[in-house]
Image: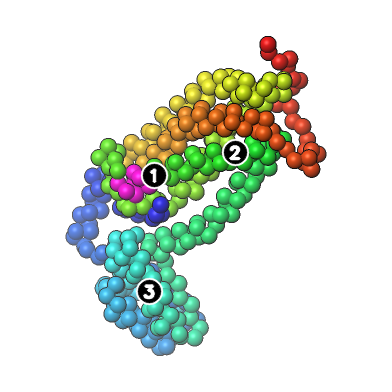
């Protein structure tokens, strides 16, 4: 999966606002949104600073990855100067990213950055997209660790088992992984463009993977705990694990199926919207809920519980101090 910032490319060009945008671009061609270089100093109009800015501009244009027209704007207090430099590409493709890397790693360090007392930063569509992806990639492990760790602890205390939380996390991650795979297949690789009415941008909008993870993990865990509670109640009444699994699936099937149908129908509506970002969100959520409520909860969950049998409830002796939680009051007598 490749994450990108779609920008204006994610909006269908048959909309009135985009037709106006295309006419403006045709009448006043200026390329994609430029890289915005912000130079800060005590006085940016000082000769040394202006010389550094000019050297930066000349070297950027000489690279062949950036072009005219280069525009500048000085703050009224002369503490900052904004230099806008158009780059190759559409703002989010490989050409734009290469040009941004050249600007940040080669052009600026060898020109304006050498001037004492200056600070230079780069923003714009391409820079914002790259920085967001880098920040998300760096923080994503912490989010996953926190969510999965907290889910493990809560399930460990609730069901007094280390097998149940581990299995729940694995099964829930299957739903999330399936959603990621479908998004990559459809929106990144371009399968189903005519059916859904979009043109592939070669990537997934950057905010969506983390959003899908937290939403889908919460919904999947909701189903999981609901079913497991019924199974655990039956086990507490003295039933075998096989009978308890059958009872749990049978008693929750109607509720789980009905809830899944409602959510799939609601999420699928987003796939009919014009913005490709909302299409991605709708397809990802609808597909994941459908897979989760059928293959994962109705097949994999009962199958793994029946295979493991009494090992589902394994708890090391050193954890026997955990509190015992009754799910539905006093246990009922076992059914004949």
Residue nearer the viewer, 244 or 9: 244
Residue 219 magenta-drawn? no
- Contact between labelled residues 2 and 3, with CB atoms less than 8 Å apart: no
Mark 1 vs mark 2, CA separation in Å: 25 Å
Q: How is the image coloured?
A: rainbow
| Residue 178 in which image quadrant | top left
Judging by the rendered image, the residue that carries numbered circle 2 is 167
Report the magenta residues as a range.
184-190
Question: For the view shown, which residue lies furthest in the left direction?
Answer: 27
Residue nearer the viewer, 131 or 227: 227
Eye-nearest disc, 1 or 2: 2
Residue nearer the viewer, 31 or 331: 331
Judging by the rendered image, the residue that carries numbered circle 3 is 103
Q: Determine whether 37 is above or below 233 in the image.
A: below
- Disc number at residue 183? 1
Mark 3 element type: helix
Question: Which residue is pictured at 52% across the width and 20% down the height?
Answer: 254
- The reply to whether residue 291 is visible in this rendering is yes
- Looking at the image, residue 112 sits to the left or right of residue 299; the answer is left
Mark 2 element type: helix
Number of other residues with Cα within 10 Å of mark 1, as a class: few under 14, some 14 to 19, many 20 or more: many
Pick whichever of labels 1 and 2 is earlier in the sequence: 2
Mark 1 element type: helix
- Looking at the image, residue 14 sits to the left or right of residue 245; the answer is left
Mark 3 vs mark 2, CA separation in Å: 48 Å
Question: Which residue is pictured at 60% across the width and 51% down the height?
Answer: 145
């Amino acid at each position: 999966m490749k994450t990108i910032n779609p920008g204006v490319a994610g909006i269908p060009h048959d909309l009135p606002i985009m037709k106006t945008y295309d006419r403006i671009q045709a009448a006043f061609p200026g390329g994609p949104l430029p890289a915005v270089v912000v130079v800060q100093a005590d006085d940016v109009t000082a000769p040394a600073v202006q010389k550094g800015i000019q050297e930066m501009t000349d070297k950027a244009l000489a690279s062949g990855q950036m072009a005219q027209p280069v525009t500048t704007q000085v703050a009224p207090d002369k503490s900052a100067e904004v230099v806008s430099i158009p780059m190759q590409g559409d703002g989010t493709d490989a050409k734009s990213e290469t040009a941004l890397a050249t600007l940040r790693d080669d052009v600026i360090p060898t020109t304006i950055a050498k001037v004492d007392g200056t600070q230079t930063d780069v923003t714009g569509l391409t820079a914002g997209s790259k920085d967001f992806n880098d920040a998300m990639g760096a923080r994503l492990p912490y989010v996953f660790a926190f969510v999965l760790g907290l889910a493990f602890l809560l399930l460990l205390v609730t069901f007094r088992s280390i097998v149940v939380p581990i299995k729940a996390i694995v099964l829930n991650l299957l739903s999330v992984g399936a959603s990621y795979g479908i998004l990559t297949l459809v929106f990144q690789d371009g399968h189903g463009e005519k059916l859904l009415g979009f043109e592939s941008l070669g990537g997934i909008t950057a905010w969506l993977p983390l959003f899908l993870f937290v939403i889908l993990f919460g919904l999947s865990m909701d189903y999981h705990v609901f079913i497991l509670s019924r199974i655990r109640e039956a086990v507490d009444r003295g039933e075998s694990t096989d009978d308890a699994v059958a009872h749990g699936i049978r008693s929750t099937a109607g509720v789980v199926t009905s809830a899944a149908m409602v959510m799939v129908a609601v999420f699928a509506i987003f796939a009919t919207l014009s913005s490709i970002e909302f299409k991605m969100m709708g397809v990802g959520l609808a597909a994941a809920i459908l897979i989760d409520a059928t293959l994962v909860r109705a097949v994999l969950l009962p199958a793994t519980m029946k295979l493991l049998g009494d090992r589902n409830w394994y708890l090391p002796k050193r954890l026997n101090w955990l509190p015992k939680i009754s799910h539905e009051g006093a246990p009922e007598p076992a059914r004949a």
